[in-house]
Image (cartoon, rainbow, N blue to C red):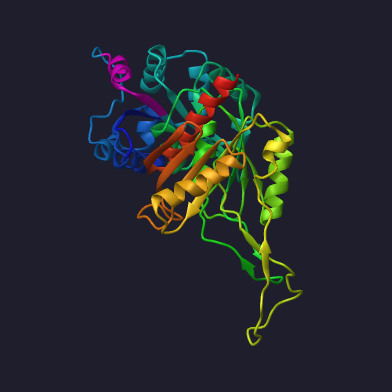
Amino acid sequence: MVRARRIVLGLTGSAAIIRAPELAREFSRWGAEVRAVMSPSAAQLLSPTLMQWATGAEVVTSLTGRLEHLELSEWADAVVVAPATASTLGKLAWGIADTPVTATVIASAGLGKPIFLAPAMHASMYLSAPVQEAVARLREKGFLFVGPVLSEGRAKMAEIREILTWVMFHRPQDLKGLRVVVTAGPTLEPIDRIKVISNPSSGKMGIAVARMAALRGAEVTLIYGPGTEPPPQGLKVIRVKTTQEMKEALEEEVRRGADVVVAAAAAQDLRVERPFEGKLRSTETVELRLVPAPRVADGVKALSPTTFLVGFKAEYGVPEEELVSRAEEKLRAGFDLVVANDLSLPGAGFGEDTNEVTLVHRSGREKMKGRKEEIAHRILDLALQSLRREG
C-alpha cells in the first residue's frame, strides 16, 4: 500500500535516540529500506550494533576515503534526522559538515533530496534565539520539520507514527499559500446531562486529510470532534463536541478565508429535541423525540462561493449505483467533490487505516482503495486542479 523508499536515518546525541531502533523497524514494516548514520555522540549513547540489527545494514559512524556521506546521499530517497539536537540544527543552518550526519544531510540537500528534521532537546534550548534562528533559516531553505512537541519543559521528538506518515507520504509543497479547513471525528448530542448520542468515528480520515494538506504546505485548521485518533502535531486544532458547535466553528473559519473545506466529520444527523435536565435513572422508561441536527457544511458556499467544498457520503450495505446516486445529490446541493463510501466493506469502516471510496465530481467518478493518507492526497489533488482552472 505504501511505495517502498530508501531512507537514511541520521542519529544525533539526544536521549530521544532510545526510540531510534523502533523508528527504523517501523520504516521497514511500512515497506522502506533503511540505512543509519550516527554522530560520535550518538554512538556513545546507543550501540551501532543495535542499529545494524534494526536496519539490517551496516551503520556509518565515521567518514573515510570511501566517502560514505556521498554514497548515502546518492542512495537515499529521503533523509530523516531523528533526533536532531540543537547543535545539529545550528551546524546544518550554516553548512557545517563536521559529523557523518551533518555531512550526509548537506550532501543530500545538494542533490535535492527531501530532509526531515525531528528536533529533541530541552524546551529552553529549542526556544532560544539562536536555535529559533537556525530553525527559521532551515525552513527557508526547504528543510521539513516534524515536531517537536513542547511539554513538561522539553521539546520532545515527534511520535513515531507522525514521523512515519510525514516521510512516507511526502509530496511537493504545492499547496503553499492555500488555506485548508478540515472537519473530523464524530459529534455528540446530549440526551441528558450525562448521556449522549454519538457514533464510533475515530476521526482518522479527516486527520489524514489535515496532515497531508500540512505536509504539502497549506495553512491548515482542523475542527475536531471527540474522536479517538490523536490530532496532528503543530496544526491549529479547534475542539468541539456538538454538531452546532462544529457548524459554528466551520463558518467562523470560512469567514476568515478558506480555499478548500473538507467536511470529513461524521457529524450527527439527528439530535434529541428536548434533552432532559439532570440525569435519567436506569429504572425509567424514556421516549426520545429525534429531530434533524444542523448540516455542518450547508452554509459554506453562501459564505464563500469560490471555496472548493468536499463532502463525504457514508452508507451501509447499499448497491454501488445507489451510493453514487446519493453522492450526486450532494453535488447538486453545491459540493464540488463528494467522497462516497460503504462502511460495510472490509477495511472501510470506522477506525480503519484504509478505506474504499468512490470520488464523485463534476467531471465523473473514480474508485480508489488504499490507505487513508493516499486517498487524502487524491482529494487534495482534485481540489488543487479545480482551483488552478478557476484561477
Q: Position of residue 371 (x, y in %)?
A: 39, 42
Find residue 127 and report its image quarter. Answer: top right
> Which residue is at the far right?
277
Q: Position of residue 21 (x, y in %)?
A: 34, 41
**Part of the protein shown in magenta:** 67-80
Residue 99 vs residue 285: left or right?
left
Point out the image quarter for the C terminus.
top right
Nearest the eye: 201 or 126: 201
Q: How many marks?
A: 0
93 drawn magenta: no
Residue 73 vs residue 283: left or right?
left
Q: Position of residue 314 (x, y in %)?
A: 49, 52
Q: Is residue 244 above or below residue 310?
A: below
Find residue 241 and report its image quarter. Answer: bottom right
Nearest the eye: 217 or 256: 256
70 drawn magenta: yes
Q: Is residue 283 above or below residue 133?
A: below
Q: Is residue 40 above or below residue 92?
A: below
Q: Is residue 12 visible?
A: no
Point out the image quarter for the N terminus.
top left
What residue lies at 37% left-to-right and 52% top-to-bottom?
Answer: 347
Nearest the eye: 240 or 263: 263
What residue lies at 67% left-to-right and 50% top-to-bottom?
Answer: 246
Residue 40 vs residue 86: left or right?
left
Q: Position of residue 29 (x, y in %)?
A: 30, 42
Q: Is residue 183 visible?
A: yes
